Image: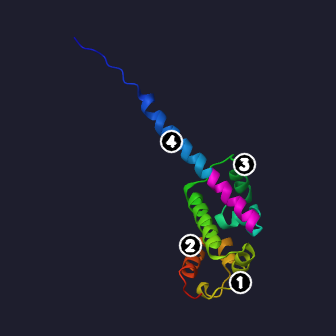
Amino acid sequence: MTETMTINTTKGTEMPDMAESLVKELELTEAQNTFEKFKEAYEWDNADIAAALQVARRTVQRYSSGDSYPARRVRSNIADLREISILLDEIFSDEADAIRWLNTTVPMLKGRRPIDLIQKGKLDEVITALATYQSGAFL
């Protein structure tokens, strides 16, 4: 006598799907918060954020409204942009000082302005300069 056993395959996939959905929602919220921080504190607009992330301005609008979810490369760039914001907050007591630093040539950046590197998507160079500055090294 042979018995047939049925395995419920949907039950095991509900949790991963729910967890993935929650992670996406949290990451999108963090992206939106990062965009707002740069808009409010550093007087950026969607075009500035798009340049930093190396995406179209409309793409930033879709992320901001929650209509689209960033690809892996863009999520990494958003995390780098958030890291820059955190470092600027930790280093400079005044947002005006942070804006001034972003727009000043920095020797460690070979005389380039951090804002120019950010606009070219070279976020890692700016993070390195800020981390070095935070450690007390002379820039």
Name the residue that disc number 1 marks.
104
Q: Secondary structure at mark 2?
A: helix
Question: First in sequence: mark 1 or mark 2?
Answer: 1
Q: Amino acid at mark 2?
A: Asp
Q: Residue furthest left?
A: 1
Q: Secondary structure at mark 1?
A: loop
Task: Return the mark for residue 124.
Answer: 2
Q: Main SS of the magenta segment?
A: helix
Distance CA(mark 1)–CA(mark 3): 33 Å
Residue mark closest to the camera, 3 vs 4: 4
Residue mark closest to the camera, 4 vs 2: 4
Name the residue that disc number 3 marks.
65
Q: Amino acid at mark 3?
A: Ser
Q: Amino acid at mark 4?
A: Ala
Structure colour scheme: rainbow
Residue 22, percent across and down?
A: 56, 43
Residue 86, percent across and down?
A: 61, 67
Magenta segment boundaries in residue numbering: 29-41
Does 118 sit left or right of 9 as displayed? Answer: right
Question: First in sequence: mark 1 or mark 3?
Answer: 3
Question: First in sequence: mark 4 or mark 2?
Answer: 4
Q: Secondary structure at mark 3?
A: helix
Residue 40 magenta: yes
**Residue 89 sits in which quadrant?**
bottom right
Q: Residue sitting at 64 percent across and 51 percent down?
A: 29
Name the residue that disc number 4 marks.
19
Dot 4, how many residues are within 10 Å of its Cα: few (below 14), some (14-19), or many (20+)? Answer: few
